[in-house]
């Protein structure tokens, strides 16, 4: 199985353009960007929460 090349990407882009139209694409891209941003923010918050839990757990064991 090979990787996706530039020709395949152009075909996929053309299909997306036909499905959604040129006026809808910027809105879709904005929504996707906001979704990714929110996902990263949530993942970072969860990582910080886990680190705090580990730190408080190790502090309570040493006390």
Image (spheres, rainbow, N blue to C red):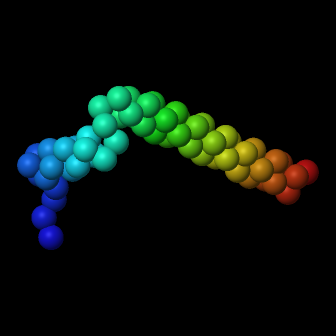
Give the residue drawn at x 26%, y 41%.
Answer: 17
Task: Pinpoint residue 7: horizontal percent, then vertical percent.
Answer: 8, 49
- Marker count (numbered): 0
Task: Pinpoint residue 23: horizontal percent, then vertical percent.
Answer: 35, 29
38 displayed left or right of 62 = left
24 displayed left or right of 34 = left
Give the residue drawn at x 34%, y 42%.
Answer: 20
Q: Residue furthest right?
A: 63
Task: Pinpoint residue 26: horizontal percent, then vertical percent.
Answer: 38, 29
Identify the image quadrant of the N terminus: bottom left
Residue 40 appears in view: no
Q: Relative to the observer, which residue lies in front, 57 or 45?
A: 45
Give the residue drawn at x 67%, y 40%.
Answer: 45
52 displayed left or right of 22 = right
For residue 25, what is the image quadrant? Answer: top left
Q: Relative to the observer, which residue lies in front, 34 or 39?
A: 34
45 displayed left or right of 20 = right
Q: Relative to the observer, which residue lies in front, 60 or 62?
A: 60
Residue 50 appears in view: yes
Task: Pinpoint residue 56: horizontal percent, then vertical percent.
Answer: 82, 48
Q: Residue furthest bottom?
A: 1
For residue 3, what is the image quadrant? Answer: bottom left
Give the residue drawn at x 56%, y 43%.
Answer: 39
Q: Relative to the observer, which residue lies in front, 63 or 8?
A: 8
């Amino acid at each position: 199985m090979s990787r996706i090349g530039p020709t395949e990407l152009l075909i996929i882009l053309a299909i997306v353009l036909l499905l959604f139209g040129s006026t809808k694409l910027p809105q879709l891209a904005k929504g996707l960007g906001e979704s990714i941003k929110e996902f990263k923010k949530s993942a970072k918050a969860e990582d910080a929460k886990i680190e705090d839990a580990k730190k408080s757990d190790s502090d309570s064991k040493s006390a």
